[in-house]
Image (spheres, helix red, strand yellow):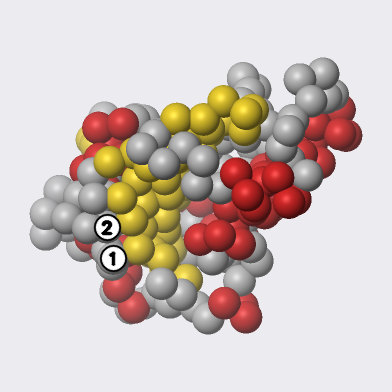
Amino acid sequence: MGSADHLSRGDSMADGIAWFLQPYLIDCVTFARGAEPADLASRLGARPGQQPRWVSSDDVVGLLAGGGVGSAVRVGRVGDWSFAIEYGDAVGPTSTGMGAVSAMGVEAVNFSLSPWHPPSMFAYYHDGDCLCSFGIGEEARRWGKSPDLLVPALTEMGVLPTQSDLRGADAERVRRLSVLVIEEHFRLQLPRADVLDGELPMFIVREA
């Protein structure tokens, strides 16, 4: 297998990102523009000089269940963006974690997915600062240095103004439209087959 930095796919082979809203597929994914996959793993806490192992999602789950690994990331790249799927204690959702990921001019987007305790969260950082963040499905409440960054697109798509009493299929539709707005704005892609069924380079972030 090649190195993590050589895992790259064209946009025509990718699948968008809205598929990860399906519950329990992944818990946390971080994208970075301006950092190669191995660099992204390092920014998320992987020790320097670590050689990645090409593993499947099931392999990582098995490692965590076996007690030898506390947290890990599998990484890749599509277009301009590197991505990291986090397992175990995810670093990406924390403000300190995202600040480190986006340091030195890097752009970073994080999704912390929690269908068991919504909302799932979106955050966009650049050069160490949070520019825009909100709960997916709760877009009316936003924060960061540029909280209204996506408001025009969210409004055009019909996500805003949101209805607080949306339930069931209507709420699911709004969440999907919100993620599609983010996908289009940042031109994000995440290859479903590689993430769920294939092997990707894995870096250990924390030993158990």
Q: Residues within 10 Å of mark 1 (few under 14, many from 20)?
A: some
What kind of residue is marked 2? Val
Q: Residues within 10 Å of mark 2 (few under 14, many from 20)?
A: some
Left or right of 87? Residue 115 is: right
* Residue appearing at x 86%, y 28% in the figure: 168
Expressed as whole percent of the image width and height from the top left, the position of residue 41 reads 27, 53
Which residue, given by chain and number where applicable, does mark 2 sit on?
106
Q: The residue tagged with tag 1: helix, strand or loop?
A: loop
Which residue, given by chain and number where applicable, does mark 1 sit on?
34
Q: Residue lying farthest right?
A: 169
Residue 179 appears in the figure: no
Expressed as whole percent of the image width and height from the top left, the position of residue 196 reads 59, 55
Left or right of 38? Residue 116 is: right
Q: The residue tagged with tag 2: helix, strand or loop?
A: loop
- 65, above or below 47, in the image: above
What kind of residue is marked 1? Gly
Image quarter for residue 3?
bottom left
Expressed as whole percent of the image width and height from the top left, the position of residue 111 reads 50, 41
Image quarter for residue 100?
top left
* Residue appearing at x 41%, y 41% in the figure: 146
Q: Are marks 1 and 2 in contact (CB under 8 Å)?
A: yes
